[in-house]
Amino acid sequence: MRPNIHVKNKVAVVGAGLTLFRRRMLETPRELAWEAASMALESAGLTLKDIDCIVIGTAPDAFDGVHLNGEYLADGAGGVNKPTVRVYVGGGTGVFVPIAAWWHVASGLCRTVLAVAEEKMSPAHPHPQGVFAYIWDPVLERPLGPNLIWIFALEMRRYMHKCGAKKEDIALVSVKNKANALDHPAAQAAAKITVEDVLNSEVLVWPVNRLDISPVSDGAAALVLASENEARRITDSPVWVEGVGFTLDNTHWYNRELGYPRYVQYAARMAYKMAGIERPWREIDVAEPYDPFDYKELHHIEGLMLARPCEAPKLLKEGHFNRDGDLPTSPSGGLLGVGNPIAAAGVMKVAELFWQLRYEAGARQVKKPVHRGVAQAWGDLMQAGTVIVLGN
Amino acid sequence: MSGGAERRLPGHYLKSKEMYSLPGLVEYRPVARYLFSAGQAQSRFLDGLKEGKILGKRCPRCGRVYVPPRSYCEYCMAPTSEWVELPGTGEVHTAVVSYISTFRERMEKPEIVAVIKLDAPGYTKGGYEFAGLFHKLCNVEPEDVISGRAIGMRVKPRWRPPEERKGDVNDIECFEPVES
Ligand SMILES: [Zn+2]
């Protein structure tokens, strides 16, 4: 590690926990948060009194249907009468949670942080799609009666046009991730499917079919982060946070090239610089790019500079991103396979790197030796990029 | 500790039917009504639509032309003092075929939705960023979107008749191919 930044403390991930990811769960949001948080503490061999500070992440309040959702979750997340903060960048929130936990520790403010993300999308019924109506600009966009899937379809169509990618090339991401998820104990949408299954599923907004999209989910995920001194006391195999990066573009998503996520690239550059990484496509061993839609994984692989622009579909076809490939992506099964409780899905990706880098991922363990991994999430109106680099 | 990921995870899945018979289930429908002002720049833009004009604002420092107009330049933080009228023509940056409504109901007749990159003479930053609008296309078939013929297509606004215009984005009925 050649850090290009001065920090008071080096920071490590020392524990992780997850609930099941499912379409509909009995537990309240705070119960889900408590389940994941307790499991993360237990996996680090700690109790709540060992934790200095709490970071909470959850996407729009409208899903859980509780305003002040961070405050509402605080007790389940272990935050009562501790320094507690909630962070939010839409779908980017999940990876932003460990990033915020990192600066709490790196700054010297806290020695240990419990970082908890939760999302419960099932209260909005019969389908949370209507809740998304409120993210659109009230003056210029809502009068057109938009559906959230429009914007993804527009981006996917642009990517296909710019890169000459076909729907069947992109569907392979869904096939890969859903198959990877067969080995994940939290998985909601694991399946052995074919490209034809994706192409024959319901067309929602062409080019997006139902199986191009991750499911609607409830779930929670948590991590424990600690300063170097604490981490070495807690475990023999800490996983170091080597770099973090985050950027936000504007909400005017129709004023920019949709075929390439500039905001992801900026965030990745920030994280790689901190980690001393110059050639990410060679120096990263395993990646968890954000995959709420199948094309998004390819888009993000390119934004993360793990492939050249428009090169990802070809590498995918060659098996480069498979679990036994040169650069496995979403070995967890991703959002497409494990599920998409928004903020919790991002933390699930970081937890997967934690397990991969400790060689604890069981049947999901990638074939090649791993030293460094990158996880990324995207959010809001095609504008937020959050990136974290971990190493062992 | 084998990474925790291999053990039975907490949480209880509910089937749809079970959800509706839960003890203590509460249904709540929020009542929230808002009046949104369009602001300094967009109010003038909407007045322009009523007159059949697409107006943008130019940054005096970097030359960016903003459509929809902003009161300030996002990059320079300078006021965008100058109004410019755009010709209205442009090209389709991307387009899709929607079979579902805002609330995910199946639609009888699919809609074609697009991002239009507008012609903005004198705007030289035209690579990644551009003046543009999100709108619907007419006289374009789903097949044109699927084959890719619609992408890059030259289009112009189809205006509603002046007496029907209300000063909102629907004063443009849709964008349609220039040759039609
Ligand atoms: Zn400017």
Image (spheres, grey):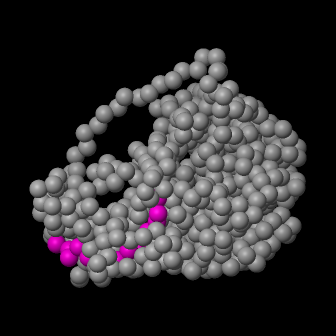
- In the depicted view, which residue is nearer to us: A251 or A22? A22
In the figure, is residue A249 to the left or right of A192? Answer: left
**Percent from the top left, x then y, of residue A190?**
76, 51
- Tell me, yes or no, if residue A376 can be seen here: no
Q: What is the quadrant of residue A288 in the picture? A: bottom right
**Percent from the top left, x then y, of residue B68?**
27, 63
The residue drawn where x is 40% and y is 44% is: A134
- In the depicted view, which residue is nearer to us: A21 or B3? A21
The residue drawn where x is 86% and y is 41% is: B7
Does residue B156 sit above or below A83 in this rendering? below
In the figure, is residue A142 to the left or right of A293? Answer: left
Quadrant of the image containing the C terminus of chain A: bottom right
Quadrant of the image containing the N terminus of chain A: bottom right
Instruction: Give the residue at the far top of this rendering.
Output: B23
Q: What is the quadrant of residue A233 in the picture? A: top right
Q: Which residues are magenta?
A: B85-98
The residue drawn where x is 49% and y is 49% is: B106
**Percent from the top left, x then y, of residue A368?**
85, 69
